[in-house]
Image (cartoon, coloured by chain):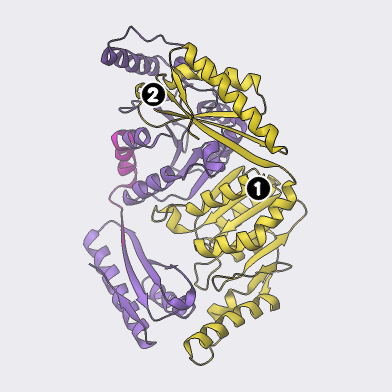
Chain colours: A purple, B yellow
């Protein structure tokens, strides 16, 4: 899977990209591997290039976030249309979703009917053959476009809306694609050993346990030995995965003990 | 400028990419435009592809974060070497930096000399013609590689080390490149107007003030009108920039007032 985040606010450092992390975490826990995250500006060409490049790598899924709203700088759908050579057109189903939203807003406030202005119709203007996805929290629908190798899903940038659509519609789709695969992980902490001294021991643990990925995460200066070791495995069989993780941790503990350090396991 | 962040932890959602935001914010405030952020795994091919693609877009600067440490999964320099067809070799200057670090650690702890193991020498193994950059906080030096169009800078992933090298060595380089350009911004808040109603007003403000970029940031459901409007401009002349921002805010306030809303300006 690839994730493409659209928004100048991400590129000027105004906004922290929590969306990418959240999606990566969800997808990973559903057994899907995220291979790349790309962040581009609110610019049709930049968006189209990122989509084209992602499609060239043929991921099973590509998820975009941001740029689905009513303002001029919401350009994701235009970028997608350009990348995939599709026309943009008002989608009847999406327009119905948008209209219902404004009816509900008016009803709640007891005001008169909200007019479907150009800015509002824009949110229902999708690339040809895109399927709108209901947004239970906000106004702009998501959309899904199936191409030969890749399923492209466009989600809003407002986190609550993005998460709602993901949970309602995308998670089941990913689960179905990944089958029984699940991601298992365990963190342990190493005391009394520098990361550079640990490096050959991690190599050994990974050689003996080829299905397990072991990564050290230094937290501060190397000589303070404040090190997290993250072990992970994607597997079908939960019990066997947990057992493999346990064995790898035991082996690491022994090796670290041999050079005078200690592995601390919480929980 | 482009930023390339290397690390599986970012792609499994374990770590929030605060490095990309921090670098984007610093670069922007120094008058440099960040056009893309790419996140890839600890994989030589993935890293090399991302570097090659970035170089193809010919940014003035490309900054990588992560993957400079002593463990097997620290592969950024290998990826850079592959992308730019350079050999990897122990860099004398970098090796001196690394050796001094371990000497200092040993001195502080009163222990005997720390041996320069393979894992430690790895941190001083740079692509040909790379120039090591001192790391005042951690062990692994950064490095700088100049190519025809792009200056490539490799920074560590540990935030404190990344920030130290950026502040010490990279910020002056960016400042020099951007000249007098500075990024100015102002946020105001709109009450009583939906984002979709605001869209045409933002269009008007941007038409009349072509140097100013105006972007609406909805914070929740559209009908709750909880909207931040972010105005920004990159300019040489601070006073004129501030004046332009003030004028644009006044104009926006008038337009929003005309349709029954209110613009709230703090500070």
- Label 1 element class: loop
Give the numbered dot on residue B30: 1
Share a chain, discs 2 and 1? yes
In the displayed structure, B254 sits above or below A181; it is above
Pinpoint residue B84: horizontal percent, then vertical percent.
Answer: 69, 59
Q: Residue furthest top?
A: A112
The answer to whether residue A212 is seen in the rendering is no
Q: Is residue A170 magenta?
A: yes
Q: Is residue B65 magenta?
A: no
Q: Residue furthest bottom?
A: B112
Q: Is residue B93 left or right of residue A124?
A: right
Count of labels shown? Answer: 2
Q: Earlier in the sequence, mark 2 or mark 1?
A: 1
Q: Residue furthest front?
A: B267
The magenta segment is A167-185
Residue lying at 48% horizontally and 19% vertically, measured from the top left = B198
Pinpoint residue A83: horizontal percent, then vertical percent.
Answer: 57, 31
Q: Which chain is indicated by disc 1?
A: B
Q: Main secondary structure of the magenta part?
A: helix
Question: What is the C-alpha distance between the residues marked 2 and 1?
Answer: 33 Å
| Few, some or many residues within 10 Å of mark 1 (<14, 14–19, 20+) | many
Of A111 and A45, which appears nearest the observer? A111
According to the picture, the residue beneath numbered tag 2 turns out to be B225
| Few, some or many residues within 10 Å of mark 2 (<14, 14–19, 20+) | some
Pinpoint residue A4: horizontal percent, then vertical percent.
Answer: 49, 40
Pinpoint residue A267: horizontal percent, then vertical percent.
Answer: 22, 67
- The answer to which quarter of the image holds residue A176 is top left
Of B99 and B177, which appears nearest the observer? B177
Q: Which chain is indicated by disc 2?
A: B
Q: Is residue B7 left or right of residue B98?
A: left
């Amino acid at each position: 899977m690839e994730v493409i985040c659209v928004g100048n606010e991400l590129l000027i450092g105004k906004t922290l990209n929590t969306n990418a992390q959240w999606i990566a975490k969800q997808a990973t826990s559903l057994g899907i591997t995220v291979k790349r995250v790309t962040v581009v500006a609110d610019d049709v060409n930049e968006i189209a290039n990122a989509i084209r490049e992602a499609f060239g790598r043929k991921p099973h899924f590509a998820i975009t976030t941001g740029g689905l709203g009513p303002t001029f700088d919401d350009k994701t759908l235009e970028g997608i249309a350009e990348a995939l050579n599709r026309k943009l057109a008002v989608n009847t189903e999406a327009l119905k979703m948008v209209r219902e939203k404004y009816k509900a807003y008016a009803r709640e406030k007891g005001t008169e009917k909200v007019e479907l202005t150009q800015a509002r119709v824009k949110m229902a203007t999708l690339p040809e053959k895109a399927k709108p996805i209901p947004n239970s929290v906000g106004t702009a629908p998501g959309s899904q476009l199936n191409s030969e190798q890749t399923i492209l899903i466009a989600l809003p940038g407002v986190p609550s809306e993005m998460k709602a659509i993901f949970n309602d519609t995308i998670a089941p789709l990913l689960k179905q694609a990944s089958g029984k695969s699940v991601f298992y992980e365990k963190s342990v902490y190493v005391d009394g050993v520098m990361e550079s001294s640990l490096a050959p021991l991690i190599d050994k643990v990974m050689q003996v346990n080829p299905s397990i990925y072991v990564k050290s995460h230094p937290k501060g200066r190397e000589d303070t030995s404040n090190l997290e070791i993250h072990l992970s495995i994607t597997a079908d069989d939960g019990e066997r995965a947990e057992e493999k993780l346990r064995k790898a941790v035991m082996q690491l503990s022994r090796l670290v003990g041999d050079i005078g350090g200690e592995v601390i396991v919480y929980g």
